[in-house]
Amino acid sequence: MEAVATQNISAESRERWFFVLMALVIAITIVMGFGLFYRAGFSTFASPWWVHVHAVTFMTWIGLYVVQTVLVAKNSIARHRGFGRFGAYWSAWMVLVALVLTPVNLATHRAPPFFTPPYFLALDWSNILIFGALVYAAVRNRRRTDWHRRLMFCATICVTAPAWGRLIVLSGAAMTGPLNVALLLPYLVIALLFDWANRGRVHVA
């Protein structure tokens, strides 16, 4: 019985640190996508104020997600819950920002040239609404930590889509919506394989 308990604790610890690692991978993806795009001269800090609002809003989420996964890994659950309350409200702000500012970008002709405005609007709004739904589900399941951490992980994967879009452009490949979405799947595949190796099964979430 003691051996089983030790094994379960070890599996839980490995899982917590796995999500820290994945949070860092996501953060690196974001920094690479936007950083390299800036270095290539495709973006500039001399952008309209709403572009900066959008950037700060979403980068704050990435930073918060990394901090939250580290707090859980270090068993600082009380602090994790405290930041979690802020995160729940912040996610709602993110959805509002995306829903409002995407049409503003279209109206000011700041949409990517490889997408038609209606396609870009549908793609961006679908992405942020899926993000919001996943965060909402994660908050509702916050006491079921196995569900909570996986739903938050899936929600944060959505935020990497714009970074991957920039990396596709920089690679010289033809930018398409399906390709952009397909590049999000490896995060899920890695998580599925980890579940299988760590728990002997893939979590239903």
Image (cartoon, helix red, strand yellow):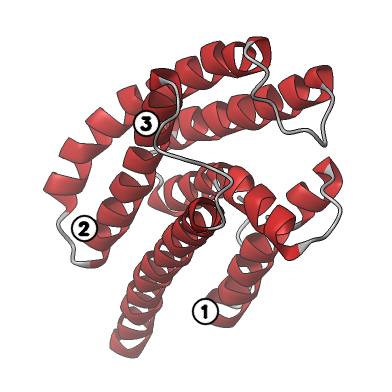
For marks 1 and 2 on the same chain, the one whose residue lies earlier in the sequence = 2
Which residue in the structure is indicated by mark 1? Answer: 198
Q: Amino acid at mark 3?
A: Thr
| Quarter of image, res 21 | bottom left
How many other residues sit within 10 Å of disc 3, few (<14), some (14-19) or many (≥20)?
A: some
Where residue 89 appears, x then y in whole percent? 32, 22
Query: Against 162, is 16 above or below?
Result: below
Q: Looking at the image, which residue is at 45% across and 64% down?
A: 28
Q: How many marks?
A: 3
Closer to the camera, 168 or 5? 168
Which residue in the structure is indicated by mark 3? Answer: 57
CA gap, disc 1 and disc 2: 21 Å
Q: Looking at the image, which residue is at 60% across and 60% down?
A: 203
Kindly tell me whether residue 55 is visible in this rendering. Answer: yes
Closer to the camera, 15 or 176? 176
Q: Amino acid at mark 2?
A: Leu
Which residue in the structure is indicated by mark 2? Answer: 71
Q: Looking at the image, which residue is at 64% across and 51% down?
A: 166
Closer to the camera, 138 or 67? 67
Where residue 193 appears, x then y in whole percent? 64, 75
Q: Looking at the image, which residue is at 82% across and 48% down?
A: 175
